[in-house]
Amino acid sequence: GGWTIMSDRQKGLMNAVARVFPDCEHRYCKRHLLANMATAGYRGEKYKSFVDSAVYAYTEYDYNIAMDALKAFNAKAWKWLNDLGKEHFSRHAFSSRSRTDLVVNNLSEVFNNYIIELRDKPIVTMLDKIRQKLMVRANQKRDGGQQAMWEITPVVVGKLEVEKKYARYCNAYQSGVGLWEILGSERQYEVNLFSRTCGCNK
């Protein structure tokens, strides 16, 4: 199916996921990956920088650059990370079945913290209190949205402004109905407007 499970690399958990959810995508949380790497003896800002570049790479080209830099810095650290399988931690290698490119499980950590005072309640009470909290939150967000003075959220506007700066160095060539080739200063990508996909994987 289209399930994605993100976790640390506890042996029991990895075996359980493979047994109970054999068809799901199993990813390793970047934060836990860095902790495992430090335990293996590879710690520090330099290693974090290499891992960040490899994990957040949207293309195999960018991933290879990051991994080659790590290999030049420490071949044993490269082997440790490479042996995990890039499909478990690097964005460019994630399955297209999954509709998320998250590489950290902060979302679940935040939700856990959000309901922390309810977790020791009986199951029905806990679920009802969670429902109430979410109901109040949804209403607050709806009220905030109705008072908004913009059609696009400020966060998205900021992202678009950044992309516009990069876009000025690109040329677009139409290759068919809804199909384009985007040529940048160093790379080219295929864009399909119908499937809303781009070769950059963003």
Image (cartoon, rainbow, N blue to C red):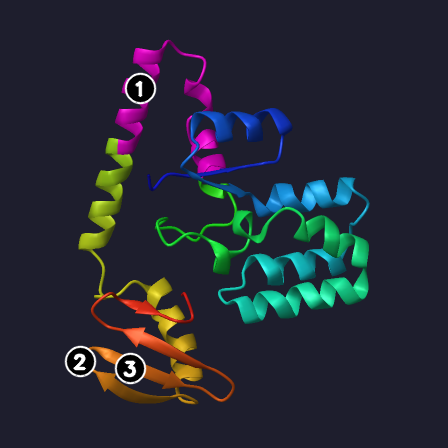
Magenta-highlighted stretch: main secondary structure?
Answer: helix
Residue 61 versus residue 34 in the image, above or below: below
Q: CA distance from mark 2 to mark 3?
A: 8 Å
Residue closest to the far top:
122
Q: Which residues are magenta?
A: 108-134
Residue drawn at (57%, 70%) of the image: 62
Residue of label 2: 177
Q: Quadrant of the C terminus?
A: bottom left
Q: In front of the other: label 2 or label 1?
A: 2
Residue of label 1: 127
Instruction: Say which amino acid is labelled 2.
Output: Val
Instruction: Say which amino acid is labelled 3.
Output: Trp
x, y (%) of residue 74?
81, 59
Callout 1: SS: helix
x, y (%) of residue 11?
63, 28
User: Pointer 3 and pointer 1: residues touching (CB < 8 Å)?
Assistant: no
Residue drawn at (43%, 89%) of the image: 169
Residue 59 versus residue 181 in the image, above or below: above
Residue of label 3: 180
Residue drawn at (56%, 27%) of the image: 15
Tell me if residue 120 is in the magenta stretch: yes
x, y (%) of residue 87?
52, 51
